[in-house]
Each structure stands twice: as structure tokens, then as C-alpha cells.
Image (spheres, helix red, strand yellow):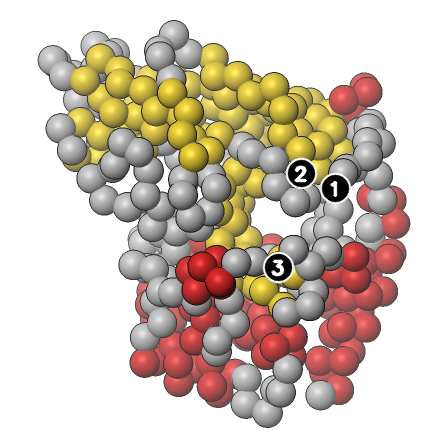
Amino acid sequence: MRKTLLLMALAAFTAGSLAAADTTTRTFDATYTATINNLPTGAGVLDVWIPLPVTREEQIISDVKIDSPYDWKEGVEGEFGDHYAFARIPVPQTGQITVRVQFTGTRRPVEFQRISDVAPTAGELQRALKADKLVTVSPRIHKLTRKITSGKQTTLDQAQAIYEYVVTHMKYDKTIPGWGHGDTERACDIHAGNCTDFHSLFISLARARGIPARFAIGFPLPKTSDGTISGYHCWAEFYLKGRGWIPVDASEASQSSDPAVRAFLFGNQSTDRVEFTRGRDLVLSPKTSEPVNFLIYPRVELHGKAVGNMSLSLQVHDRKGGEGMSTSMQ
């Protein structure tokens, strides 16, 4: 109990200290660039789905424009409200497609003590307890979560114990093949991976304990004004009744030896990220050949088969000379 109380005290202290300089919102212009290489050449038409950023509780997204000569149609995923665009594109002779999405974002800090309780529907809670293809709720996950949360009486204490376990037992490592799919069973086997693997394990353990949890993915933003980010970042959220959806970033926390940073990343977020989509096993329209594991890369199919190698970047330019912008979030 003392350890949990200490962690919460650190979180409260850090939310006030680390976020003290981050009390205003951050407004920026961004360009998402996705390059799809090694496409098969020859006759045929590609089906292409790309993610689009969308306004959520902690961010406002506006002026979304797709810089591409193709005819894109926007869709909305039914369970999580993700936005995406779809186009049919003739197979290019170059074997490569580049798509750019420009948008303006305003991001506010998330502080545990100020999270508004937007009560989810019964369907949302049921979905947040349901296993996904790779986010399993297997017998060994049940056994492990019982061990981790033994003696913890409240949902908050149980979630915090799970977070501490993932932070201390997982290693951020992209050298071992198989990382990046968000595979809970692999995470249990080798205790290593990237942010998708960390947060799949957290979500699985939370769900096994009866705590609704969900997956979110987007990009980190440069700590200073402008810059280019060459890869995605993801995190998890769990639902605390009477409080709301609480963010956790176990993978970022694992890379810091500072207890205050680790405490901050349980329940708090600064303005240094932007969310694109939520959820796993996403069903899009037109339907992909199988549900999409998570949506941050484009999904490209030819004759019902996924094709191409993907690379991503996000170019960011802060408004007002790179110093950020104080904007009211309604």
C-alpha cells in the first residue's frame, strides 16, 4: 500500500511540476507522409486505406487535406470512431506510392486530477474487455494478473500494479524479430518489444482483471518547436469509474530511470503527442481481407492480399514561430 501511495503522490507532484511549463495548449501544422515501396508491378488496381487524425477529448484536428492525385473517400470506423480514407489506385510502374496528409492540431496536456468523466456506453465497455487476435486474455494472462494484483482492492491500485509490472519487466528492444505487432503472448515469452508490445500486455492484463482498457496510436511531437518524427508511438488507456479514461505510457516510462517521470506517465500526458486512431482488429469499409491489427500505416491490398513495405514520418511546425500557441479547448 505504501508503494502505491508513494507513486500516486509522485504523480500528483510531477503533474504539477513537469507540466508547469506546459499548461497552455500546443498548436501545430503537421504533414503525415507514408511511403509504400516494393509494390508488385504490372496490371492491377490497389485498394489503399490511410489513417486520418481526428478530434478527440484531448485534441482538436482541423484542415485535414490529402496531398495526392487520387480520388479519396473518407470513412469512419464503427467501434472506435477512427477516420480513414480509401482509394483505388492503378499499380504504379515505379513500384512506389507516397501519400501526404496535412492537418492542423491543437493538443492540451492531460492531468490525472483534471480528467473529465465522459461515461462510456455499455458497448464501449464491453469492447474494452474483449480480447483481440493478438491482445489475448489467455489462462496464463489470468494467472499472471491475479499474481500482480494480489492484495490490491481498488481498480486504481490494480491498474497501477499492472503498470509497474509492465514498466519493470518489459525491455524496449527492436532487435529481436517479431516486435511491433502488439502480441501479448510474445511479450510474455521474451519480455521485450516496442510500444505496441508493451501496451498489448498492459491491456491484456487489465482486461483479465476486469478493467476496461483500450489502445491508442499516433506520433510523438518534437520536444522543441519544429522537427520530423520518423515513427509512430502508442499508449493505452483504462477506464476508472467516476474518473474517466486514464492514459498510461509504459514503454516511454521504461526508458527512464527517474521515478518522477515514471509516475507522471501513469495518468498524465504532456502536449508532445498527437493521436491518430484507437483500437485493434479494426473493420474498415470497403472491407480489408482481414481486420486491421492497428491503423497507423496505410493498408494496401492487391487482389485481396496485403502488399508493400511501409515507412512513415510526421513533419511538425509549431504555430507562432515555434513557441506554441495558447488556445482554448472546449
Task: Please say if the residues under marks 2 and 1 sit with CB atoms less than 8 Å apart.
Answer: yes
The amino acid beneath tag 3 is Ala
Looking at the picture, how far across and down is residue 134, in whole percent? Answer: 32, 59
The quarter in which the N terminus is drawn is bottom right
Q: Nearer the viewer, mark 3 or mark 1?
A: 3
Q: Please identify the quarter of the rendering in which residue 68 is found.
A: top left
Determine the CA span between mark 2 and mark 3. 18 Å
Percent across and percent down for residue 276 are 52, 38
Q: Residues within 10 Å of mark 3 (few under 14, many from 20)?
A: some
Q: Residue at x 52, y 49 (%)?
A: 216
Q: Where does the C terminus fall, quadrant-wise?
A: top right
Q: Farthest residue in the bottom direction? A: 151
Q: Residues within 10 Å of mark 2 (few under 14, many from 20)?
A: many
Query: Does the image show residue 184?
Result: no
Please tell me whether mark 2 sits on a helix, a strand or a loop. strand
Of the image marks 3 and 1, the number of the one nearer the N terminus: 1
Residue 274 position in % (x across, y down) = 61, 38
At mark 3, the secondary structure is loop
Q: Which residue is mark 2?
A: 59
Please name whichever residue, 254 or 248, is drawn nearer the observer in this view of the structure.
248
Choose the circle earlier in sequence order: 2 or 3: 2
Q: Looking at the picture, which amino acid does disc 2 mark? A: Gln
Q: In the figure, residue 228 lies in which quadrant?
A: top right
* Residue linked to disc 3: 119
User: Residue at the spot x=29%, y=59% of the render?
Assistant: 133
Residue placed most toward the observer, 191 or 78? 78
Q: Is residue 316 left or right of residue 225?
A: left
